[in-house]
Amino acid sequence: MDNYNNYNYPGHDAYYQHADDLSTKLSAVMKRVYLKMTLALIVTALVSLYAGTSISFLNFYFTNRWMMWVLFGAEIAIVLGVSGGINKLSSATASLLFYIFAVINGLALSPIFVVYTGASIAKTFFITAGVFGAMSVYGYFTSKDLSRWGSILTMALFGLIIVSVVNIFLKSTTMEWIISGAGVLIFIGLTAWDTQQIKQMALQAPMETAGKLATLGALSLYLDFINLFLYLLRFFGNNRN
């Protein structure tokens, strides 16, 4: 009876040691995810600010339209390379590609400093950070399974891309506002879902893969943040003209 009351039954210590190990691993992975994501956002912001205020770069960018497609193609290639080949890449290589992506994305986003005022860009960034942070915290701590969210949001995202392409030719202002509103809702949801997915993978993956998982997780959340920022910018951004 004494042994039972003191919870000294077989397997008790091993169970709690395992739980402690999982908690420690999860904490370590998530810290690395958010650290890498934050560093990538800083890199993107600095590169974008520098390029967006450089007359020589902007002149080159706007007089050579192919550059936009080169940057876009490079981004797609890196995302597919890191996501699809994460098991074949070393942790250092995956991290390097991620930060190169952040630099390229900074160059691609630089024209926003021509279109919008710096104050409205900063305001939108902080609004995005608040919304993103709230949804990421929700995704991390909720006990609700968000798997169904993921499938619905993924289909909605593909639909959004198709409608956005169609609207390039229609040039409908009303449709553009609808697309922007839908984009905000989709990436708010994806932030929570991706956070939960990263948490689950961190609990299941071996510790030796923590570095790669952190990079993959940081890339997913980085993309959620950037897209959410761009859609919110259409609502909160003030045009220079």
Image: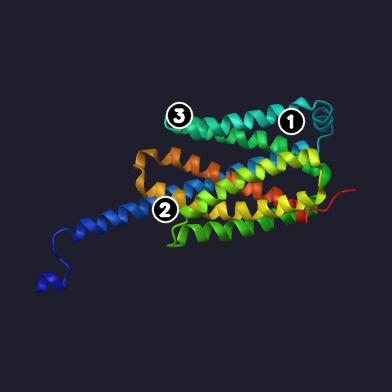
CA distance separating discs 1 and 2: 39 Å
| Image mark count | 3
Q: How is the image coloured?
A: rainbow
Answer above or below: position of 79 versus 156. above
The mark nearer the N terminus, 1 or 2, is 2
Q: Position of residue 95 (x, y in %)?
A: 52, 35
Residue identifier under label 3: 89
Q: Residue furthest right?
A: 241
The residue indicated by pointer 2 is: 27
Label 3 crowd (10 A; few <14 / some 14-19 / many >=20): some
Q: Position of residue 55 (x, y in %)?
A: 84, 33
Amino acid found under the numbered disc labelled 2: Ser
| Amino acid type of the residue tagged 3 in the rendering | Leu
Q: Is residue 236 visible?
A: yes
**What residue is at 15 percent from the left and 65 percent from the top?**
8
Q: Secondary structure at mark 3?
A: loop
| Label 2 – label 3 distance at C-alpha | 23 Å
Compared with 211, 78 (above or below) is above
Residue 68's disc number: 1
- Residue 38 seen in the figure: no
Q: What is the secondary structure assignment of the residue under circle 2?
A: helix
Q: Residue 41 location, x and y as percent?
A: 62, 44
Tag 1: Cα neighbours inside 10 Å, few (<14), some, or many (≥20)?
Answer: some
Q: Secondary structure at mark 1?
A: helix
Examine the image and state in which quarter residue 171 appears.
top right
User: Taking 21 as reference, is 161 left or right?
Assistant: right
- Left or right? Give the position of 130 relative to 81: right
